[in-house]
Structure formats: C-alpha cells, structure tokens
Image (cartoon, grey):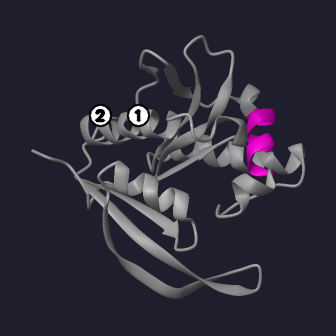
Amino acid sequence: MTTVERQTIKTERILLRHIVENDIENIFKGLSHPDVIKYYGVNFQSLEATKEQMDWFAGLEKEETGIWFAVCSLDNQTFYGAGGLNNLSKEHKKAEIGFWLLPNYWGLGIMQEAMPLICNYGFEKLGLHRIEGIVETENKNCKNAMAKLDFRHEGTMTDCEMKNGKFISLDIYAKIKIE
C-alpha cells in the first residue's frame, strides 16, 4: 500500500479534495446539525471543540489509517459534506467508509456520485480489498444508499452500542474489490 497522495478527484459535477484547516466552519456546521448527527457517531457543540475532528482527519493521513475528503461543488465554492475511509488495516486490506452531507444537499445524488469515487480511491490507490460500512439500524436512508451503491448487507449486531443512554443496533455492509 502506498502513502496517501494529496490529490483531488473530480466528476462533471463534484470535487473531492483533502480537508484543510479552513474547512473547520463547514465541518462544525455539519457535525453540530441535529439532522446530520442523528445517526452519526460524533458531534460538536462549538467551533473550538470541532478542532478535535480536524486533528482526527489530519491524523488519519499522518498515521496512514485512512483519508477523508471535503465534498464540494466543482468550482470548490460550495461545501456539501465530507466522506472518506478510516480504520484502515494494511494487514487485512480493508477500511471503513463514512459519509455525511449538509441537509440542503440531501436527495440530490451527491452521495451516489461521491461514494464510488471514495471506494475506487480505496481499491486503486490504497490497495484495499474490502470496504465496510457500519450503519445504525434505524438509519433507513443510509441503508437504502448502501444497497444502491452495491454494498452487501452482511448482518446486524443487535444492541451492540450505547447512544444517548439507549442500546442501538448496527448493520454491517461491505463492498469487495472486483478483480
């Protein structure tokens, strides 16, 4: 597996680029929004606290345990959300995919366009064989998106984590590199 290269990935409509310090306000906007964090594992109540997430993004690349991208308009003027790979295991050639969008951009096909780019990056640039998606069982929209993106549902871990004082279940999805 090679070290993560700094590059951008484009389609006719979107740009994926490395997250930079100047993205902190947009990251905070997303990770403090009640609709975005409803099924998300982290959230922040202040811009200052969001620095922890920015450090996490930088740490992924430094430690070679993943990469996250800002998902933007092609001209890089509009920030839609973020997505990427984390929990990368070089030994097992796998990583976990994650993704979120600001609510104004839901339902526009942005996730369906960006997630395959992230998967291809993982398979082609990072040498992954398997990409996993862990989705809260109650998150119907994300589960539907995983199915549309050809991630296979492998099972459900019932009552496996605590969130807001209640047990939640997690569905496991995976996509395997086609040789």
When asked about the image quadrant of residue 151, the answer is: bottom left
Residue 179 location in percent, x, y?
9, 44
Front in this rendered view, residue 103 or 44: 103
Say whether residue 136 is left or right of residue 122. right
Which residue shows up at 45% across the image and 50% down it?
Answer: 65
Which residue shows up at 39% across the image and 70% down it?
Answer: 172
The reply to whether discs 1 and 2 touch (Cβ–Cβ < 8 Å) is: yes
Asked if the magenta segment contains residue 31, the reply would be: yes
Residue labelled with disc 1: 4
Q: Does dot 2 land on a helix, a strand or a loop?
A: helix
Q: Majority secondary structure of the magenta segment?
A: helix
Which residue shows up at 74% across the image and 44% down it?
Answer: 30
In this view of the protein, can residue 88 be seen by the observer?
Answer: no
Residue ranking furthest to the left: 179
Relative to 52, is 143 above or below? below
Front in this rendered view, residue 70 or 67: 70
Which residue shows up at 65% across the image and 64% down it?
Answer: 39
When asked about the image quadrant of residue 92, the answer is: bottom left
Name the amino acid, label 1: Val
Q: Does dot 1 land on a helix, a strand or a loop?
A: loop
Relative to 144, is 165 above or below? below
Sooner in the amino-acid sequence: mark 1 or mark 2: 1
Residue 120 location in percent, x, y?
30, 37
Residue labelled with disc 2: 125
Q: Which residues are magenta?
A: 24-32
Q: How many numbered circles are shown?
A: 2
Front disc: 1 or 2: 2
